[in-house]
Amino acid sequence: MASDFWLIAGLGNPGKKYEGTRHNMGFMVADVLAERWTVNFADHKGLAMLGKSTMNLDGRTVKFFLAKPLTYMNESGNAVASIAAYYQIEPDHIVVVHDDMDLEFGRIKVKAGGSAGGHNGIKSIDRSLGTPKYARVRMGVGHAKRGPNAHDNTVNWVLGGFGPDQRKQLPDFLADGADAAEDIIFKGLAKTQEKFNGR
């Protein structure tokens, strides 16, 4: 029996060293949602910090779980699949929020299915769920410099922090990411795409 709960998973890497880095956009959006809907996190099998709450929007109430995987990015699927199996949440009720280097900083794209676009967290979730057909909120972080050390540049970029200008814009950007996750649940994917993808 599929549950009527939704699961929102914000991706990132655990630990002080990664706080506030580009790769932790998902964690930061999860924190915004946790604040909005009074979610208290507790440990789920050592795989994730997990909390449960309800959202009330447009006169409707939706029950949801909010997860921040503790597995490090490349194993995010272990956490997401474990929670989904444990609470019987189907992929069409899963929303994953993650950083995306193919989008400029401040841009958000919403999609379901399709390629992982080189994102190891998404590849891991696709593998663990056995399907890419869940919703994704892609939070643009811009791209590292191309060139001879492209791989190292990329790693340093996603694990790097934001410059002063971006830090100023970050609270609004994270709030938009949280809005996008809520909109997917309350308005559906197509309407949410209309709102965010064209920006």
Image: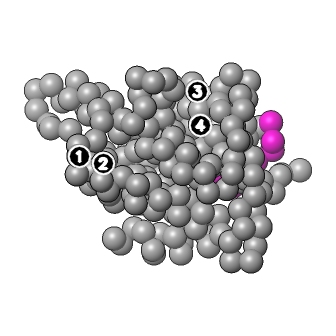
The image's mark for residue 140 is: none
Q: In this view, does 175 lie above or below 1?
A: below
Q: Earlier in the sequence, mark 1 or mark 3?
A: 3
In front: mark 3 or mark 2? Answer: 2
Which amino acid type is shown beneath numbered disc 4? Lys
Q: Are marks 3 and 4 in contact (CB under 8 Å)?
A: yes
Q: Position of residue 83 (x, y in %)?
A: 73, 37
Extent of the magenta region: 86-94
The residue tagged with tag 1: helix, strand or loop? helix
In front: mark 4 or mark 1? Answer: 1
Badge 3, how many Cα within 10 Å: few under 14, some, many 20+?
Answer: many
Q: Earlier in the sequence, mark 4 or mark 2?
A: 4
In three-dimensional space, the C-alpha distance between marks 1 and 3, rounded to whole angstroms, equals 28 Å
Badge 4, how many Cα within 10 Å: few under 14, some, many 20+?
Answer: many
Q: Which of marks 3 and 2 is nearer the N terminus?
A: 3
Q: Name the residue under label 1.
A: 164
Residue at (34%, 59%) from the top-left corner? 107
Which amino acid type is shown beneath numbered disc 3? Leu
Q: Which of 2 and 143 is in front in this view?
A: 143
Q: Name the residue under label 4.
A: 68
User: Relative to residue 38, is residue 194 drawn left or right?
Assistant: left
Q: Name the residue under label 2.
A: 167
Image quadrant in which you'd find residue 59: bottom right
Q: Mark 3 points at which residue?
A: 70
